[in-house]
Image (spheres, grey):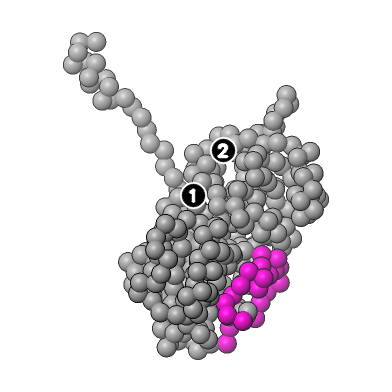
Amino acid sequence: MNLAIIFGGQSYEHEISIVSAVTVGRVLETSPLYIFLDSDNRLYEIPSNKMSSKLFKSGEYRKEKKLNFTFNGFTTEGFFKKELKGFTVLNLIHGGQGEDGTIPALLEFYKIPYIGPRKDASTISYNKHLTKIFADSIGIKTVDYETLYIGDERKLHKLSYPVIVKPLSLGSSIGVKVANSDDEFQYALDVAFEYDSEVIIEKYIDGVKEYNLAGIETDKFILSIVEEPQKGDDILDFNTKYLDFSRDSRVVEANIDNEIRLLIQDSFKKIYSPIFRGSLIRCDFFVIDDEVYLNEINSVPGSMANYLFNDFESTLKELSENLPNVGNISVKYEYIDTIQKAKGK
């Protein structure tokens, strides 16, 4: 598998992406090509022996070779240009440009094969409101919610306390707060609006069971184990979830009834196919009164959820060899020829 990992990007999850890239490289048998996108939208080729969080914090990465996108790959800058082609790119930019469709659009524009959400899938999974609408359209339940824009009247319209407040387009539990009163609600809005101009507010259900499942589909589904993540006091907060991005050893499978496991797997398959083909995603589910609810779709999960798979590298290789085929549109100028003939030209 000739793999290149693109990571970093303009995102509140920039540092998390770096940790994910280091971790994924550590679990792969063959060292990938590392392509770092910095906060100024410059690309750098990072040697595998220099992959360390300190390199990026210090700015030393700027001494490495600069890259540019080109047809089917990348080229180095400078007089003696070098082409880097024949790679499948793993999109490991969390949030921001990696999950909002920007990087997928660039990779598709330059016809570079890649593992990750396509543009339409990115649009759905990046926006938590659209995720809810999508889930409803395919018969997957979600918890009750309402949305609020930054200029709206800051009050609840349908829900009652306690509620959980989230930025609309952000992951890793950044900016997420539980509110049990009006004062806590106002504070939670202040925090969330620091990251986004719109928030989603959900009914908070104390003690709800949460489960994670990752997978891919090629000619068949390859699913991970089902994990029950360990939460903080109220929610799966950033400090707890941060471990996902640096885990390189397998976690313990959730101890749940097989009927619930099958319901979770069935829900995952409905969500994945066909819109998320070409990507390795992780879905986070709630189980309430023996019914499965979708919490979130992680289209670029932390460390690609490697810790959930029996054989992560084989799963990634299987996906890289069965990516969606994007055909070319043949432009023949027949319409223009017809007009010119009609004008006698």
Q: Residue at left 75%, top 40%?
A: 62
Please state which amino acid type lies under the numbered disc 2. Asn
Q: Is residue 268 above or below residue 64?
A: below
Q: Nearer the viewer, mark 2 or mark 1?
A: 1
Report the residue marked by disc 1: 101
Percent of width and height locating residue 65: 74, 37
Please state which amino acid type lies under the numbered disc 1. Gly
| Residue occupying the far left of the picture | 342
| Residue occupying the far front of the picture | 183
Q: Is residue 67 visible?
A: yes
Q: Is residue 129 above or below residue 3?
A: below
Percent of width and height locating residue 112: 55, 42
Looking at the image, residue 133 sits to the left or right of residue 79; the answer is left
Report the residue marked by disc 2: 72
**Residue 251 magenta-highlighted:** yes
**Residue 155 magenta-highlighted:** no
Mark 1 falls on what kind of element?
loop
| Residue occupying the far top of the picture | 345
Mark 2 or mark 1, earlier in chain: 2
- Residue 234 is marked as none
Looking at the image, residue 45 sits to the left or right of residue 292; the answer is right
Q: Is residue 278 visible?
A: no
Q: Residue at left 63%, top 79%?
A: 232
Magenta residues, start to end: 233-255
In terms of depth relative to the viewer, which is nearer, 59 or 31? 59
Mark 2 falls on what kind of element?
loop
Percent of width and height locating residue 109: 49, 39
Q: Is residue 149 above or below residue 311?
A: above
Label 1: few (<14), some (14–19) or many (≥20) C-alpha neighbours in 10 Å: many
Which quadrant holds residue 17?
bottom right
Which quadrant, please, contains the C terminus? top left
